[in-house]
Image (cartoon, rainbow, N blue to C red):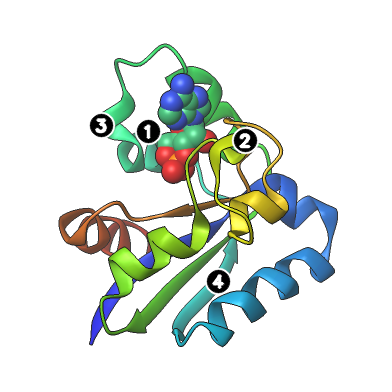
Amino acid sequence: MQQTYFMIKPEIVAAGDQKVGAILSIVNASGFRVTGLEMRQLDRPLVEDFYGEHRERPFFGDLVEYITSGPVVCIRLEREDAVSRLRELIGATNPAEAATGTIRFLYGESLSNNAVHASANTEDAARELDLIFG
Ligand code: CMP
Protein backbone atom coordinates (compact mmCIF):
# COMPACT_ATOMS: atom_id res chain seq x y z
CA MET A 1 0.00 0.00 0.00
CA GLN A 2 1.20 3.48 -0.86
CA GLN A 3 0.04 6.87 0.31
CA THR A 4 -0.32 10.06 -1.68
CA TYR A 5 -1.54 13.60 -1.18
CA PHE A 6 -4.59 14.92 -3.00
CA MET A 7 -5.96 18.45 -2.79
CA ILE A 8 -9.21 19.92 -4.08
CA LYS A 9 -8.48 23.52 -5.00
CA PRO A 10 -10.35 26.69 -3.94
CA GLU A 11 -12.57 27.25 -7.00
CA ILE A 12 -14.07 23.77 -6.61
CA VAL A 13 -14.62 24.18 -2.86
CA ALA A 14 -16.18 27.61 -3.48
CA ALA A 15 -18.54 26.05 -6.05
CA GLY A 16 -20.09 23.93 -3.28
CA ASP A 17 -20.38 20.44 -1.86
CA GLN A 18 -21.71 18.82 -5.02
CA LYS A 19 -18.47 19.15 -6.99
CA VAL A 20 -16.34 18.17 -3.99
CA GLY A 21 -18.56 15.11 -3.48
CA ALA A 22 -18.43 14.16 -7.15
CA ILE A 23 -14.61 14.31 -7.19
CA LEU A 24 -14.36 12.25 -3.99
CA SER A 25 -16.73 9.67 -5.55
CA ILE A 26 -14.50 9.33 -8.62
CA VAL A 27 -11.46 8.79 -6.41
CA ASN A 28 -13.29 6.31 -4.19
CA ALA A 29 -14.65 4.37 -7.20
CA SER A 30 -11.06 4.06 -8.45
CA GLY A 31 -10.03 2.03 -5.41
CA PHE A 32 -8.49 4.73 -3.21
CA ARG A 33 -9.18 4.80 0.52
CA VAL A 34 -9.41 8.17 2.28
CA THR A 35 -7.23 7.98 5.40
CA GLY A 36 -7.20 11.72 6.17
CA LEU A 37 -9.43 14.59 5.14
CA GLU A 38 -9.62 18.18 6.28
CA MET A 39 -11.04 21.39 4.81
CA ARG A 40 -8.48 24.08 5.52
CA GLN A 41 -7.53 27.65 4.72
CA LEU A 42 -3.79 27.28 4.06
CA ASP A 43 -1.56 30.22 4.96
CA ARG A 44 0.96 31.86 2.65
CA PRO A 45 4.21 30.49 4.24
CA LEU A 46 2.88 26.95 4.13
CA VAL A 47 1.82 27.24 0.47
CA GLU A 48 5.17 28.86 -0.48
CA ASP A 49 6.90 25.89 1.11
CA PHE A 50 4.49 23.37 -0.44
CA TYR A 51 5.05 24.71 -3.97
CA GLY A 52 8.72 25.57 -3.28
CA GLU A 53 9.98 23.82 -6.43
CA HIS A 54 8.10 26.45 -8.49
CA ARG A 55 9.52 29.45 -6.57
CA GLU A 56 11.50 30.78 -9.55
CA ARG A 57 8.69 30.27 -12.08
CA PRO A 58 6.82 33.37 -13.33
CA PHE A 59 3.46 31.98 -12.17
CA PHE A 60 4.59 31.37 -8.56
CA GLY A 61 3.06 34.55 -7.08
CA ASP A 62 -0.30 33.94 -8.75
CA LEU A 63 -0.24 30.28 -7.71
CA VAL A 64 0.31 31.14 -4.03
CA GLU A 65 -2.34 33.90 -4.22
CA TYR A 66 -4.84 31.48 -5.73
CA ILE A 67 -4.25 28.56 -3.36
CA THR A 68 -4.57 30.90 -0.36
CA SER A 69 -7.70 32.62 -1.79
CA GLY A 70 -10.08 30.27 0.02
CA PRO A 71 -10.38 26.90 1.74
CA VAL A 72 -9.06 23.75 0.07
CA VAL A 73 -9.80 20.12 0.87
CA CYS A 74 -6.64 18.27 1.97
CA ILE A 75 -6.81 14.50 1.53
CA ARG A 76 -4.53 11.56 2.33
CA LEU A 77 -5.20 8.62 0.00
CA GLU A 78 -4.06 5.03 0.09
CA ARG A 79 -4.00 2.20 -2.47
CA GLU A 80 -1.47 0.15 -4.45
CA ASP A 81 0.63 2.45 -6.66
CA ALA A 82 -1.34 5.38 -5.27
CA VAL A 83 0.99 8.09 -6.59
CA SER A 84 1.00 7.06 -10.25
CA ARG A 85 -2.63 5.88 -10.28
CA LEU A 86 -3.85 9.21 -8.88
CA ARG A 87 -1.78 11.15 -11.43
CA GLU A 88 -3.44 9.11 -14.18
CA LEU A 89 -6.87 9.73 -12.71
CA ILE A 90 -6.48 13.52 -12.50
CA GLY A 91 -5.04 14.00 -16.01
CA ALA A 92 -2.61 16.56 -17.45
CA THR A 93 -1.82 19.80 -15.57
CA ASN A 94 -3.49 21.81 -18.31
CA PRO A 95 -7.17 20.75 -18.45
CA ALA A 96 -7.18 21.50 -22.20
CA GLU A 97 -4.69 18.62 -22.57
CA ALA A 98 -6.26 16.27 -20.02
CA ALA A 99 -7.54 12.91 -21.27
CA THR A 100 -11.31 12.44 -21.56
CA GLY A 101 -12.90 11.40 -18.29
CA THR A 102 -10.05 12.53 -16.05
CA ILE A 103 -10.84 14.84 -13.12
CA ARG A 104 -9.15 17.84 -14.75
CA PHE A 105 -10.95 17.11 -18.03
CA LEU A 106 -14.26 17.13 -16.16
CA TYR A 107 -13.67 19.92 -13.61
CA GLY A 108 -10.61 21.98 -14.62
CA GLU A 109 -11.13 25.46 -16.06
CA SER A 110 -7.60 26.52 -16.98
CA LEU A 111 -3.92 25.84 -16.27
CA SER A 112 -4.05 27.91 -13.09
CA ASN A 113 -7.58 26.83 -12.06
CA ASN A 114 -7.10 23.12 -12.69
CA ALA A 115 -9.40 21.80 -9.93
CA VAL A 116 -7.04 19.48 -8.07
CA HIS A 117 -3.45 18.74 -7.13
CA ALA A 118 -1.80 15.31 -6.71
CA SER A 119 1.75 14.54 -5.62
CA ALA A 120 4.09 14.06 -8.59
CA ASN A 121 6.21 11.26 -7.10
CA THR A 122 6.71 9.29 -3.86
CA GLU A 123 9.21 11.80 -2.43
CA ASP A 124 6.80 14.67 -3.01
CA ALA A 125 3.97 12.59 -1.52
CA ALA A 126 5.92 12.06 1.72
CA ARG A 127 6.96 15.72 1.88
CA GLU A 128 3.48 17.08 1.10
CA LEU A 129 1.70 14.72 3.52
CA ASP A 130 4.15 15.72 6.24
CA LEU A 131 3.65 19.44 5.54
CA ILE A 132 -0.14 19.22 5.55
CA PHE A 133 -0.94 16.46 8.06
CA GLY A 134 2.25 16.57 10.16
P1 CMP B 1 -0.36 21.65 -9.57
O1 CMP B 1 -0.37 20.23 -10.00
O2 CMP B 1 -1.06 22.00 -8.31
O3 CMP B 1 1.18 22.11 -9.44
C1 CMP B 1 1.59 23.45 -9.65
C2 CMP B 1 0.51 24.31 -10.20
O4 CMP B 1 0.90 25.53 -10.81
C3 CMP B 1 -0.20 23.56 -11.31
O5 CMP B 1 -0.98 22.51 -10.76
C4 CMP B 1 -0.99 24.68 -12.01
O6 CMP B 1 -2.27 24.88 -11.46
C5 CMP B 1 -0.16 25.92 -11.69
N1 CMP B 1 0.39 26.55 -12.89
C6 CMP B 1 0.10 27.79 -13.31
N2 CMP B 1 0.77 28.08 -14.42
C7 CMP B 1 1.52 27.01 -14.74
C8 CMP B 1 2.43 26.69 -15.79
N3 CMP B 1 2.72 27.57 -16.76
N4 CMP B 1 3.00 25.47 -15.78
C9 CMP B 1 2.72 24.57 -14.81
N5 CMP B 1 1.86 24.82 -13.78
C10 CMP B 1 1.27 26.02 -13.75
Q: Amino acid at mark 4?
A: Glu
Q: 10 Å neighbourhood of mark 1: few (<14), some, or many (≥20)?
A: some
User: Residue 131 placed where, x, y %?
Assistant: 30, 56
Q: Is residue 44 visible?
A: no
- In the image, residue 88 sits, relative to residue 50, either above or below, namely below
Q: With 101 as the anchor, is 22 left or right in this view? A: right
Q: CA distance from mark 1 to mark 4?
A: 19 Å
Q: Identify the image quadrant of residue 28.
A: bottom right
Residue that label 3 marks: 53
Residue that label 2 marks: 96
> Could you tell which of marks 1 and 4 lies nearer the N-terminus?
4
What residue do we see at 46% from left, 88% from top? 31
Q: With 128 as the anchor, is 23 left or right in this view? A: right
User: Residue 111 placed where, x, y %?
Assistant: 57, 31
> Could you tell which of marks 2 and 4 lies nearer the N-terminus?
4
Marking on residue 48: 1
Q: Is mark 4 within 8 Å of ligand 1?
A: no
Residue that label 4 marks: 38
Please identify the quadrant where the N terminus is shown.
Answer: bottom left
> Could you tell which of marks 3 and 1 lies nearer the N-terminus?
1
